[in-house]
Each structure stands twice: as C-alpha cells, then as structure tokens.
Image (cartoon, rainbow, N blue to C red):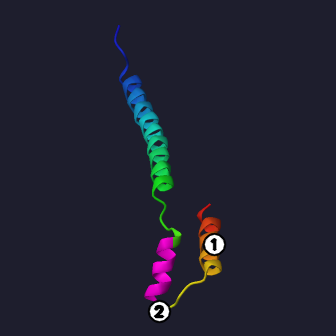
Amino acid sequence: MEIPFWWIIIAAVLAVIITAVATFFIVKKIFEKQMEKNPPINPAMIRALYTSMGRKPSESQIKNVMRSVQKHKK
C-alpha cells in the first residue's frame, strides 16, 4: 500500500497552516499579557514628558492624556 505523493504534499501544507495559526494565537496571547503587565505609557511618564517640555502638568491634563491613550488603544 503506497501513499500517493500528492497526499504527502497536502498533509505537509495543512501541517504548516495549522502550525502558523496556532503560533499566531499563542504569540498574540503572550503579547497581550506583556502589555497588561508593562503598559506602554503611565501617568509618571506623562508627568516626565510635560516636565521635560518645561511645563508643570495639572492632574486634569494627565487624566485627559491617559483617557486619550486608552481611547485610541482599542
């Protein structure tokens, strides 16, 4: 009983596709966890940014910037 060559090719292509899809979802989940643990921007960073520009930020300015970042993140 010999397996046709085209069956081997189809099986190999399916294996590559399934592996690629599984890898995508695994990496996506890991990346999302990393972003939750280490957010790209926080209020201390915003204060430092304002201070480096020579301004003293008010709490409402910081909250507005954080709200804007959260709104555009999704």
Could you tell me how many numbered marks the image carries? 2
Q: Nearer the viewer, residue 18 or 6?
A: 18
| Mark 2 residue crowding within 10 angstroms, few (<14) / some (14–19) / many (20+) | few
Q: Nearer the viewer, residue 54 or 29?
A: 54
Which badge, 1 or 2, comes first in the chain's sequence? Answer: 2
Residue bearing the label numbered 1 = 68
| Mark 1 residue crowding within 10 angstroms, few (<14) / some (14–19) / many (20+) | few
Query: What range is drawn magenta here?
Result: 44-53
Residue at horizontal 56 percent and vertical 84 percent from the top:
57
Residue bearing the label numbered 2 = 54
Dominant secondary-structure state across the stretch colored magenta: helix
Residue at horizontal 64 percent and vertical 76 percent from the top:
64
Q: Is residue 63 shown left or right of residue 47?
A: right
Residue at horizontal 40 percent and vertical 36 percent from the top:
16
Residue 26 appears at what percent x and percent y? 46, 41
* Image: 35 above or below 3: below
- Dot 1 lies on which element? helix
Residue 48 appears at what percent x and percent y? 45, 79
Residue 38 appears at what percent x and percent y? 45, 58
* Image: 11 above or below 2: below
Image quadrant for the N terminus?
Answer: top left
* Amino acid bearing label 1: Ser
Q: Nearer the viewer, residue 50 or 72?
A: 50
Residue 63 appears at what percent x and percent y? 63, 73
Q: CA distance from mark 1 to mark 2?
A: 22 Å
